[in-house]
Amino acid sequence: MPSPASAAPEVVLNGAVTCDQVAAIAAGSPIGLDAEALQRVRANRETLERILSTGTSVYGISTGFGALVVHAVTPEMQRHLQVNLLRSHAAGTGDDLPGEIVRAAMAVRCNGLLLGHSGVRPLVLQRVAALLNAGYVPRVPRTGSLGASGDLAPSAHAFLPLLGEGEAFAPNGAPIGGGEVLRRLGMAPLQLESKEGLALINGTHFMSAIGAIVARRMRRLLATIDAVTAATIDALRGALPAFDPRVHRLRPLHGQSASAANIVTALRGSARVAGPAALRLQDAYSLRCAAPVHGAAREGLRFFSELVHADLNAVTDNPIVFEDPDEVISAGNFHGQSLALAFDTLRLTIADLAAISERRTFRLVSPTLNGRLPAFLTADAGASSGYMVIQYTAAALVAELRALAHPVSVDTIPTSDNQEDHVSMGMTAALMTWEALPRLERVVAIELLCACQALDADPGAAGAVVEALHAAVRGRVPTLTDDRPPAGDLDAALALITDGTPAELLAAAGGRR
């Protein structure tokens, strides 16, 4: 669980937040609430109260929810309605969501409410900030959201501790009841007013929070994959002309040109890929077409990031409160179809990046394809198997990623007596993407291990970035001379992938993100 947030720089929320800021909050940064935005929230609450004073019927305030919209709720029961909403909708199941996701989602919900169209009091947002800044993270089961009507079930679990109910994790990671959390913080249970329970749970904040964290990790991973690919090309003494910038200017895709430039940058100074040292006029597609394939993934990430950024800074609850003139409008901004489509698209790119990486790994270890390199990268082939079976692991991971790439944005299942007859399944898509990303990181780590072993088996001056990357790996993983369990090697290489070392080495040499 994240430690108390006070040790990290504060992120001030005002209705406009970036993916990087959300990722920082997820990692432990405390949140502040912009004073001007809070005034906007206060004014919007006054607008809602004026509307309610006229006796106007408003969904979720004077009516039930979903298909229960036809049932009236008397004024004396309207506060209780909001409490019942959180209690009844806390219907999640399964393993707990990671604390970083819960922190980020609650902050994103605050950011959307700060836009001042949800009819809540500033006090509600201040309580959320106080809870997170003290290092408490609500306990939220992972399964239950359909990504339309918002992330209802996980959000209900997330905000129940504000009422002194539900469960949370203390700063030391120990589970604790919501009532005990408030006692330790010296706060009374939050008394929800009209609309406030609905505003807290009706939105796309869990989906978009996951999207923000994924976008940041994926951006760094794309640069890492370019650097690792360069190491493979160097190890195989591949053909450099395929990455000539003149080639990529003829196909005006920014992502493709960026990946080609990164590979050239990483190979700068190599004596293995130019002139008589190069083995081939042109390479197999997994090498020669790396820039177009990686570039397509970059374009997929651009599409993904744009849609995520939009929802991070949107009003995604229902109904929405307007002023000049005063009006409450029931609509559908909570529907997560744009995010579901974004996550489905990104998982396709993840699966394809893993597939081309595995093909490069296969080429490195295969005695029929790896040129002058030893079979399975061992000097004692036959008696030793070298890195033969770690390629099997890469293949198994690719198979899992292909299963995870199944699109769920088309798999609507109607709910609430067909009042909610088309849902996005966006949270399912988000969680599948969350599971896919570390699998891709492992596939890339396997390629990196094999590329470094190949460089050792066939010595020669590699590119400066490749040499630095090889040194970083060898600082953690010794050259394979006798068979040993490769699982430990993989874990060590994976740590370099996840901490962004290849991307940082590339950036230091002038590479692109």
Image: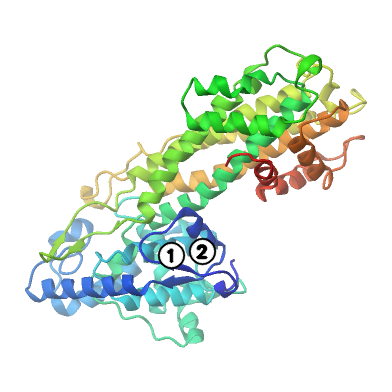
Quadrant in the picture for the C terminus: top right
Disc 2 target residue: 25
Q: Spatial distance from mark 1 to mark 2, Cα to Cα? A: 8 Å
Quadrant in the picture for the N terminus: bottom right
Residue plotted at (49% across, 20% down): 250
Which of pointers 1 and 2 lies earlier in the amino acid sequence?
2
Disc 1 target residue: 107
Q: Which amino acid does label 1 sit on?
A: Ala
Res 392 seen here = no
Please state the horizontal and vertical placement of residue 152, each as a whole percent of the image: 35, 59
Give the answer, above or below, for where 389 lies relative to 420. Answer: above
Res 164 seen here = yes
Please state the horizontal and vertical placement of residue 490, each as a whole percent of the image: 75, 42
Marks 1 & 2, CB-CB < 8 Å contact: yes
Give the answer, above or below, for where 282 lies relative to 110. Answer: above
- For the image, the number of numbered tags is 2
